[in-house]
């Protein structure tokens, strides 16, 4: 094998299979941050209240700010693509549009949050990756693998993504980038404080003429955070996108315009936390740009809610978290009509620490005005067998209500059904975390999921319209392996691999989304210094999808610090792989970008 910093031969990579890649990962240990070491910061998505690493009982992947800095990534989806069992099915580069799947789930079965506040779009999960956070404002990204409905409610089948924003901003920072296909990007952020008041603001914008016809894009994002003391914080952001959507949802050149405004307020007391939020998302979609007077749909969805939770110590070994949430979602649409529903929830989780053992029973009740009620229990536990080995296990139930698109959408190729019912699932996992030597961390997890009344777009014949149905039950099982080792303050390697199998039983129809998943996923990254103060970062991703398609993607970055700025050249898809993450939607080949940013 080549040195970890050298480029792999494209022909050799294409000949390697999934088994060979797994062996490569275990032997060389090249990817980004795996589980943090025991003295790392707390994890918040795995439980209702923050839990230190040594008490974790779930499989959680964390990307800290330092991890993000050491990856050749320009967007949040680029970071998420490096997590085990996470499948990013992009329709456009640089995070413009993507579907997010975890552990073989449908893209609608992942819950996305910002600072613990859900941002899933009630119109369609295609908008869940419209993150209202710029990469420069991210403190860390936490990925909970497995069900999370007992903690945060609907949609958390495959897992939860929680984006934690920065509370402390740098004084002034800026960057400018340019590259192929007319790509230009600029960003600026600044922060200042006066007494107990701290203020930060960030702006990012980019554009490209597109690597194909009708694949251009333009994005702009603005956000601000105001903090008063250490208890209260207000966050507001606005994201506006326009992009060519050639073949995204049907065999025609399409165009889409989206905009999103997100506001959240948080007040943290000694034992209680209050959060209030409002999100509004606009979507205008032209099905065929050759017929501007043809099929045009406009949608405006809005979500609002408030959450309160409190934590009490019952004894020296037990703590109880209780909470409740009120919320509502509504839509005004030229295609879907006007609809709304309200939701309420109550939840509780017990943390019980018995020496080297941690046990977490939890229960949540959710009620919807349109879909009835759901109870989602969970139980997880971990045990440090020795100072270097931990065994963990968990089981829980998850549920999801249909989106407005799944209930009411129609166009020349699609017809939704308003008779859909919510879907549900039971999941279980067992795993081991192992510290084989100083600075090493290894993890192995086995998981299983049983889903009922799964919602999908299906058709019996190629000439039929796609229609929504509650299809038969699914059985999903898989395994995840990760390995990480830092090599000093400026170097590190790590690796992840997952294998997933989805069994739908006998199928007499064509599935559009649910049965399209990554059977094998592998990712590897490395970063280290070179002579002349040059730093190198590289990631390698492998995917083999359920229909047999497979591809390798190699990204990297070379950069050097100067007195006042840092200069770098970034490359994506250096192997010039021809691939489609969403069937029928081409992704770009080799793409170079030159970046200058202030230090």
Image: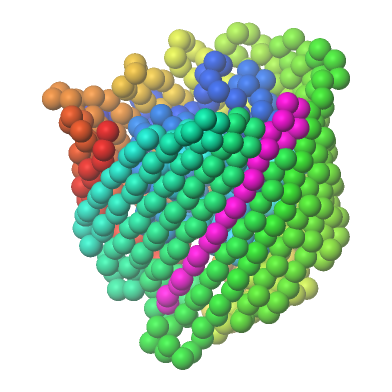
Residue 429 placement (x, y as % from top left): 68, 34
Instruction: Tell me if I can see residue 406 in this picture.
Output: no
Is 178 inside the magenta-drawn segment?
no
Residue 270 within the segment the image draws in magenta? yes
For residue 241, say whether it is visible.
yes
- 184 relative to 76 in the view: left or right: left
Residue 294 point in image, percent of width and height: 48, 89
Q: Quadrant of residue 539?
A: top left
- Does residue 384 appear left or right of residue 184 in this picture? right
Quadrant, the N terminus: top left
Q: Quadrant of residue 474?
A: bottom right
Relative to 444, say whether 449 is above or below.
below
Span shown in magenta: 254-273
Q: Main secondary structure of the magenta part?
A: strand
Residue extending farthest to the front is: 195
Question: Which residue corresponds to the image point at 72% horizontal and 40% vertical from the top-left?
Answer: 274
């Amino acid at each position: 094998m080549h040195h970890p910093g050298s480029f792999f031969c494209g022909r050799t990579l294409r000949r390697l299979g999934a088994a060979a890649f797994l062996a490569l990962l275990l032997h060389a240990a090249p990817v980004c941050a795996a589980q943090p070491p025991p003295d790392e910061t707390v994890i918040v998505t795995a439980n209702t209240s923050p839990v230190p690493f040594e008490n974790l009982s779930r499989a959680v992947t964390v990307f800290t700010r330092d991890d993000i800095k050491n990856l050749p990534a320009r967007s949040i989806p680029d970071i998420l693509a490096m997590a085990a069992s996470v499948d990013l099915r992009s329709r456009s580069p640089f995070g413009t549009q993507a579907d997010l799947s975890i552990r073989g789930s449908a893209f609608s079965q992942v819950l996305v949050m910002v600072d613990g506040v859900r941002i899933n779009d009630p119109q369609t999960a295609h908008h869940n990756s419209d993150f209202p956070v710029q990469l420069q404002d991210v403190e860390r990204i936490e990925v909970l693998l497995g069900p999370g409905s007992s903690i945060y409610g609907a949609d958390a089948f495959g897992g939860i993504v929680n984006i934690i924003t920065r509370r402390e901003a740098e004084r002034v920072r800026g960057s400018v980038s340019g590259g192929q296909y007319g790509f230009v990007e600029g960003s600026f952020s600044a922060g200042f404080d006066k007494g107990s008041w701290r203020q930060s603001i960030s702006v990012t914008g980019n554009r490209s003429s597109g690597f194909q016809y009708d694949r251009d894009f333009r994005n702009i994002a603005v956000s601000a955070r105001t903090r008063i003391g250490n208890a209260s914080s207000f966050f507001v952001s606005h994201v506006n996108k326009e992009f060519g959507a050639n073949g995204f949802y049907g065999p025609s050149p399409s165009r889409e315009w989206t905009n999103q405004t997100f506001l959240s307020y948080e007040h943290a007391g000694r034992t209680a936390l209050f959060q209030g939020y409002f999100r509004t998302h606009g979507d205008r979609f032209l099905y065929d740009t050759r017929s501007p007077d043809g099929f045009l749909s406009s949608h405006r969805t809005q979500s609002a809610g408030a959450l309160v939770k409190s934590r009490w110590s019952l004894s020296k070994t037990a703590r109880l978290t209780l909470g409740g949430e009120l919320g509502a979602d509504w839509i005004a649409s030229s295609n879907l009509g006007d609809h709304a529903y309200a939701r309420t929830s109550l939840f509780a989780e017990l943390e019980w620490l018995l020496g080297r053992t941690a046990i977490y029973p939890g229960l949540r009740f959710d009620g919807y005005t349109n879909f009835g009620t759901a109870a989602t229990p969970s139980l997880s536990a971990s045990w440090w067998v020795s100072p270097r080995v931990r065994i963990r296990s968990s089981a829980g139930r998850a549920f999801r209500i249909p989106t407005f698109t799944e209930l009411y959408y129609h166009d020349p190729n699609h017809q939704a059904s308003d008779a859909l019912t919510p879907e549900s699932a039971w999941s279980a996992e067992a795993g081991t975390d192992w510290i084989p030597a100083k600075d090493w961390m290894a993890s192995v997890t086995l998981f299983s999921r049983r889903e009922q009344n799964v919602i999908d777009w299906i058709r019996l014949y190629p000439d039929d319209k796609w229609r929504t149905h509650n299809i038969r039950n699914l059985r999903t099982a898989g395994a995840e392996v990760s390995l990480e080792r830092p090599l000093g303050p400026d170097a590190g390697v790590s690796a992840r691999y997952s294998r997933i199998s989805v069994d739908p039983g006998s199928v007499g129809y064509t599935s559009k989304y649910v049965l399209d998943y990554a059977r094998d996923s592998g990712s590897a990254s490395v970063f280290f210094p070179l002579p002349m103060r040059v730093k190198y970062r590289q990631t390698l991703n492998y995917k083999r999808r359920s229909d047999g398609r497979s591809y390798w993607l190699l990204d990297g970055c070379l950069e050097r610090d100067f007195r006042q700025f840092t200069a770098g050249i970034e490359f994506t898809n250096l192997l010039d792989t021809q691939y489609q993450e969403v069937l029928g939607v081409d992704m770009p080949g080799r793409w170079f970008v030159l970046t200058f940013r202030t230090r």
